[in-house]
Amino acid sequence: MSISNLAKVLQSNLNAQLELCRKLEEFADNLPNDVDAQNCLTLARIISPILRQAHEFEESTLFPELKKNFSEDAQLMATLERLRFEHWEDESFADELRESMVNFAGEFDSELVNSLSYMLRGFFEGVRRHAAFEREHILPILHTSEGRKPDRMSG
Ligand SMILES: [Fe+2]
């Protein structure tokens, strides 16, 4: 994949994750009164696929390409490891969140509202931080590589 395509896919995946966060925040803001069970289930179903698609691209395509081209950049190598670990954490969190949302859609247990709200905020805040980091630190590397090292990255 060319560098400009890597950047495009990353950007589009980041947008999808931020859009998911926006929807989850909207849902959390409407708790506990304005709950749409169908919306709750729909959201529950899309969380993991959106995350996994983004992570799969980064770990199978983007990170190996960066590792190949910047293997001497120890700081970047450590950053990629950390991002990979965060993916794993976010995916585990996403599985838990899906389960809670499916349960909540089944019965609007008022006792669950606080814990669900807390989980939702923890989740989308974490995903937003991760996405912001990748937008600020990984995307620029791709843009710089595209301009300066056309021969170094395979395409
Ligand atoms: Fe990521």
Image: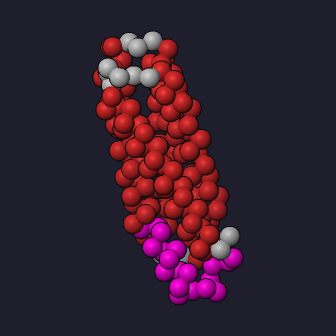
Where on the picture, by quarter, is residue 23? Answer: top left
Name the image quarter holding the C terminus.
bottom right
Out of 117 and 95, give the one closest to the viewer: 117
User: For the point 47% across and 67% down, which residue is it?
Assistant: 138
Q: Is residue 37 visible?
A: yes
Picture coordinates of residue 18, whole percent (x, y) = 44, 50
Picture coordinates of residue 38, whole percent (x, y) = 51, 23
Picture coordinates of residue 137, whole percent (x, y) = 42, 68
Which secondary structure type mostly characterizes the magenta part of the structure? Answer: helix
Picture coordinates of residue 146, whole percent (x, y) = 55, 81
Q: Report if residue 140 lies within the magenta region.
A: yes
Out of 77 and 144, give the one closest to the viewer: 144
Q: How many marks?
A: 0
The correct choice, above or below, for 56 with respect to 102 in the image is below
Name the image quarter holding the N terminus.
bottom right
The correct choice, above or below, for 57 with respect to 145 in the image is above
Where on the picture, by quarter, is residue 111? Answer: top left
Q: Report if residue 39 lies within the magenta region.
A: no
Out of 133 and 73, give the one closest to the viewer: 133
User: For the point 49% across and 28% down, which residue is it?
Assistant: 39
Out of 43 and 76, give the one closest to the viewer: 43
User: For the point 36% across and 36% down, which residue is it?
Assistant: 26
Q: Is residue 71 visible?
A: no
Magenta residues? Answer: 137-155
Query: How does the figure colour the protein chain or chains?
Result: secondary structure
